[in-house]
Image (cartoon, coloured by chain):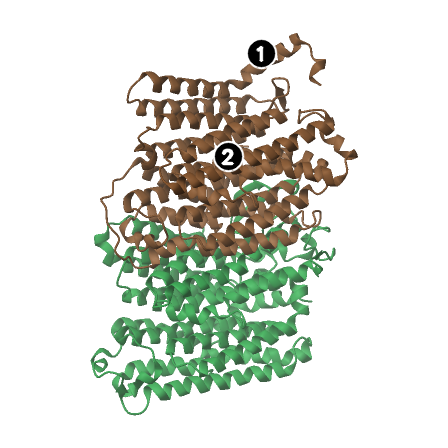
Chain colours: A green, B brown
Amino acid sequence: MGLLSILIFVPLLFALMILLLPKKYSQSYKYFTVAVAVIQLAITAYLYYQFKTGTAFTGVNQLDSYQFKEYLPWIRLDVGKFGALQIDYLLGVDGFSIPLLFLSALVMLIAALSSWEIKENHKGYFSLMMLLNTAIMGVFCALDIFLFYVFYELMLLPLYFLIGIWGGVRREYAAIKFFLYTLLGSVFMLLVIAGLYFSVIDPVTGNHTFDMVHMMNPQNYVPDGIFSFLAHQDILGIPARLLGFIVVFIAFAIKVPIVPFHTWLPDAHVEAPTPISIILAGILLKVGGYGIIRIAYSIFPDVALNLSFYIGLLGVVSILYGAMVALAQTDLKRLIAYSSVSHMGFVLLGLASLTSEGISGAMMQMISHGFLSVMLFFIVGVIYNRVHDRYIYNFRGLATHMPIYTGFVMVAFFASLGLPGFSAFIAEAFSLIGAFNSESINGLIPRWMAILGSFGILLGAAYLLWTLQRMFFGQLRVKEESWLIKLKDLNAREILTLVPLAFFAILLGVMPSLVFNIINSSVNQFILLFT
Amino acid sequence: MRTGLDIAQSTENIIASLSYFVPELIISVGFLLIILIDLFIKRAERLVFIASLVTLLFAAIAYFIQLNIIQTNSLLLFNGMFLHNSYVIGFKLLALFASLLSLIFFNQDRDLKNHPKGINDFFTIFLGGVLGLLTLISSANLLMLFLSIEILSIASYLMVSYTNKEKLQAEAGMKYVLFGATASAIMLYGLTFLYGFSGSLNLYNENIFIAFEHINSFSASLVLLMILAGIGFKLSFVPFHFWTPDAYQQAPTSVSSFLSTVPKIAVFSFLFRLAAPFQLVSIHFSSIILFAAGLTMLVGNVMAVFQKDLKRLLAYSSIGHTGFLLMLLVLPNDSIMSSNLWFYLFAYSITNIGAFMSVAVLDTNFNVKTLEQMKGLGKLNTLIAPCLVIFMVSLTGLPPTVGFIAKFVVFSSLISETTAISFLVPILIVAVLTTVLSLFYYFNIPLHIYLKKPEGLIIKKQKLIFLDFIIVILAIIVLIAGVFPDFFKIF
């Protein structure tokens, strides 16, 4: 049993423990959760430190160069003339997954620390959260596409209950909407997965395989397979590979979310309790981005190349639309939810450029947005826990009343709007450079997209600064007099939570090489897929 | 033709066949024994239950032994009345397993137990029905097919109407009988055509289907449709499904659970065995089946969304699953496909029986019949409510449950044939869309149990009964088979 398996199954073990412990220990569950997250953070930090880079450790479509690999045969089921379903328990990480693993562990720790607000049914809450934790770690480690799918779907169930039971007023609606949207995408993806399985063979054993790394190499496709590069099969008059890409892309685009598949996000974020909003924004959206890179782009590079223009366009639309809708929000949590749509647009724009800068920027944006959105949602949670209100115009002049809090808010806001010195600046700058250079390097997306994308930063500055001005500056005034007593400044636990996030946001802004060095060889290998 | 056989040869065949027929004989003996026990011993409920249980267990053991010593090639028994091979035995074992679960369920069902007539007659009828099931699975002759279906049907009519007291129950029972009788008559008519065109009743006679080469395709399709009507009634695929929701709602929960699983195992295994020859009868067979599959999935899943009554909801869900399974019938009929069908039926049976059992337990403890009444139940019942959620997840087909593996196996068997079979792609899309739709109503149950706040629920004293134990075991099997499906393949 390797480190990755331990990383995945430790939370499951603790979930069982929580379920078996009698109710009178319910106050200790949250410490278990924190303990699990600390263990995971330690493991991922160790993995990150041990992670090797260079041409021998590129990952992507080279199975041998993945690191911390684990392999066990899992399911063998006969399905007709193509022989047995050969599903393996195959784990491994490369430059694309290792930073996201670290991010996930950190976000889970923050979510655990912010779970102090949960007041009822601790047993259910913490065991579901542990189950979610298992699924998340599994998604980033799985290299077998079936295993990936199992973990991917496994995320939905706990989230449905976590939003639905501990959420806000419209929680039922938000929970089922989130579930239906994601499932619609993923069941169609299941068909593509089955189709891919029958099109790909393991070059060593000659059996059909679910190994997604094998699916990335054109020579592993059987000549008459439905997704074969050469056969050009049609489904309903549409080329099969095009259809496959679109299905998989939409499945993950719903998760990212990309306009026009984003409408579940504001509902889910707003209704979810703070820790779940944090996990949604910090990790779940990245699962979408990761899926697009790892599955949609890597398995269908030929189609992705042809559709670059449209994908870039979707990215730009997300950036601008998200930012403009955010500008119109009066609920602080909704505003941040829409800002996520806008920021995740940069991931798509950077990716569509298929340049080294653009893809590094996209990865950086995912990590940076992980830290910053978590920080933003935690900040909203602080106010909401104290007075149970998030309406922007109900607050004014908080800067004098809660100075430490305001300090962290300013860090988070300035970091999010892309001020140099913070991680988001590096991320957005690189995405835009990639998009801008694309026309001269590979001619995939036109320059005006990069220019329009940069307007998104401007709009981001507008809504964030305006909110800062509305809520924190000016004369102190809140809706009810009694709130002033409730609105205490941050306590030690909250500061402890925010400090590492702010620290990483600044650290990556000053030393982006910490991430770039790790992902660089994988990014270069990834680009080779498209030549 | 039978006339060519002399008496001696035919008697020899019968005697030789008897040894293969032991499990069915065990059930027949059990059936008679129970009638006698009930006649001569007073207050024999417990004894009758144990006798039925032992009968089924012995039959299952006999099949296990047969499965282990079976030769690879198929045998025809009793002058071509029954087929005997591992495929048939595999499905018989599954049907027996589901019957065993049903038997335990019957014995715990409040409606049946408290009935003035007593439950003993019911067990007799049930064992008769099981005999019909088993002969249906192995029948190799059109007459045997009709006889088996009739035995099964009559047993089901009686079981559904066993507790009839009210008008609505009588209506449901009547609907069921009338529908069933009409469907059987149509099927019998179809079978006479089959005999008329080919001159044989033996399904394994080479000539029987080849004869249809000379019949025009319209009449051939008509014959096929007629036969499918009788079978479709048992499977309740659209448009023969009208009886299902009423019968399931009004029958005792345990009977609904039995009807929604066990006859389907028998009929599907028979139909799948004959799918390939039926394709010879009419070239439209695949299209008819796919059309029915699509329609059944749509009707079942769409109607389920609007249901408020739990048993009606499960009734429509079972219609939806029938549609899903029908798609498998268009595939080439080989041992691997049979094994896939077996696995899907296995997954569906344990999940569905588990779901019905949970509903029955909740009904007994909290008097819950509709979704509305389920509000906030999760807080009151911490054992069965989570199990019910697991069953719903499995029925939707999400990992890590057995329902997901089953669904995936069906999808992957079909996806490789998309180019070979016309209409398959649109039907697959229907299957995917209805799967998403099914999430909506299956998750109405966890929604009401966990997400809604309770309002005015009467908390009765809960007794842990044997059924709780079975439910938990089934839920665990659903999860384990979802992660390690390899353990649960018997052939």
Compared to residue B469, the image places residue A183 above or below, namely below
- Residue A468: quarter of image: bottom left
Type of amino acid at the residue the image marks with label 1: Ile
Q: Position of residue A530 (x, y in %)?
A: 67, 66
Residue A194 visible at all: yes
- Residue A410: quarter of image: bottom left
Choose the circle earlier in sequence order: 1 or 2: 1
Is B218 situated left or right of A451 in this image?
right
Type of amino acid at the residue the image marks with label 2: Pro
- Residue B205: quarter of image: top right
Which of A425 and B359 lies nearest the eye of the viewer?
B359
Residue A256, numbered label:
none
Q: Which residue is mark 2?
A: B263
Is A63 situated left or right of A140 in this image?
right
Task: Give how far apart the Cα atoms at labels 1 and 2 are.
Answer: 29 Å
Residue drawn at (64%, 54%) of the image: B426
Tell me the crowding category of disc 2: few under 14, some 14 to 19, or many 20 or more residues within 10 angstroms, Cα based.
many
Question: Which residue of the protein is positioned furthest toward the right in this rendering?
Answer: B214
Disc nearest the viewer among 1 and 2: 2
